Image: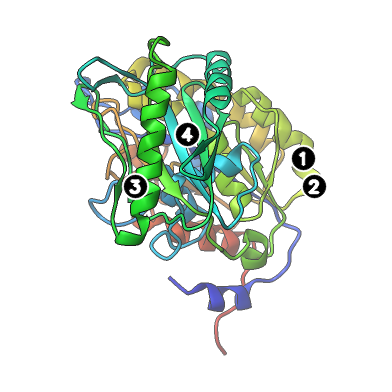
Amino acid sequence: MIGEKELVKLVKSSDTKIVLIVMDGVGDIPDKSGKTALEQAKTPNMDKLAAEGNLGFTLPIDWGITPGSGPSHLALFGYDPLEHEIGRGVLEALGIGLKLGPNDLAARANFATRDDKGIITDRRAGRISSEVNQKLCEKLSRNLEAIDGVTVKVYPGKEHRFVAVFSGEGLYDNLMDADPEETGKMEKFVEALDEKSARSADIANKFIKEVQQVLKDDHPANTCLLRGLAKAPGITGFGDLFGLRACAIASYPMYKGLSRLVGMEVIEGLNTLEDEVEELKKQYNNYDFFYLHVKKTDSYGEDGNRPSKVKTIEEFDKLVPGITGLKPDVICITSDHSTPTDIKGHSWHPNPILIKGPHMRKDGACAFDESECLKGAYGTMFSKDVMQILMAQAGRLKKFGA
């Protein structure tokens, strides 16, 4: 991939518009029926786009590497995820509108269920409601203000998720998550990967134990898992890198946080796919680039719920004409990572991608699914190269060299 310093020299202005749709975790593997979720779903509108554009697959990080949502989205936004490591705690904090200072250490937290032996029996506390989440955070705030001279604040997110921010001098973030990653396993605590991060790990672990004490009678949310403990990094702005006025249309905090981190304008108050598409229509004349996020394909993949994943794909397909009717110059539909329902989590499988622009070589594919993507003209490419293709199709890149 051409580096950021060289890429910025090639960017030129244009009045073209780009729409990037990320169907989170939509990539899958065949179940007993022999089909993936995309292959089972009825998607006439995306299939029409597939016949008019080009297909292929993307790799967020590298072959065989299972990516987190942060680095895989960052790659789709055109940044090398190996050069720009961003902790999930930072993204979650920014996603709910927090501003992090240089002495802040943020963690993405899950309310979870723990039995009396310390076994995590539910990593999401039954996906408690956002209303219950808020009450639990208020209870924690009343009982937890500081640990060893470090200020502690908690902020509710959606469903079982919340954000914990530790503020004080001498906090470092070379830390391992406090998350067993599977139900039925013993609880984990934060581990420091170097000596200077040891104090941060100790404070985070004391926080977990304090949470357990405060919430001991609040089944199913009687403990928490801390993930992605991190401090905010510096990063080149999306507008500076690509010369685009960019708008992020997403409902979940982490994706809004990543968008804010790279300098996109973030729309608040969206809850449904219908809300998102209507907001895209409303904002269409105000921006050059739109990132629209579809979350539930990933949620149902993690739950192992194939019927609901298929239904979400079909529901989104019905909204596609509302997007194509705006006549964007370039439209891309892809995934940040695959979340197969049989695996119930992120996987290393390449992600299907569809790109339609004004300068396409037809590849013979006629539907947007994994089988047809195998025929696609793009083959398998790295996610970080997608933005360059979208920019080229939009006529926003100059020739390199004489």
Report the side of 232 relative to 68 (left or right): right
Q: Residue at 40% of width from left, 49% of height from top? A: 200
User: In which quadrant of the rendered view does residue 366 lie?
Assistant: top left
Query: Circle 2 sits in a helix, a strand or a loop, which is it?
Result: helix
Q: Residue 392, image x and y in percent? A: 58, 64
Residue that carries the numbered disc 1 in the rendered image: 283
Number of the label disc, if any, that sits on residue 67:
3
Gap between marks 1 and 4, in whole Å? Answer: 26 Å
Label 4 sits on what residue type? Asp
Gap between marks 2 and 1, in whole Å? Answer: 5 Å
Q: Residue at 67% of width from left, 25% of height from top? A: 275
Q: Nearer the viewer, mark 1 or mark 3?
A: 3
User: Is residue 68 shown to the viewer in this render?
Assistant: no
Query: Dot 1, how many residues are within 10 Å of its Cα: few (below 14), some (14-19), or many (20+)?
Result: some
Gap between marks 4 and 3, in whole Å? Answer: 27 Å
Number of the label disc, if any, that sits on residue 286:
2
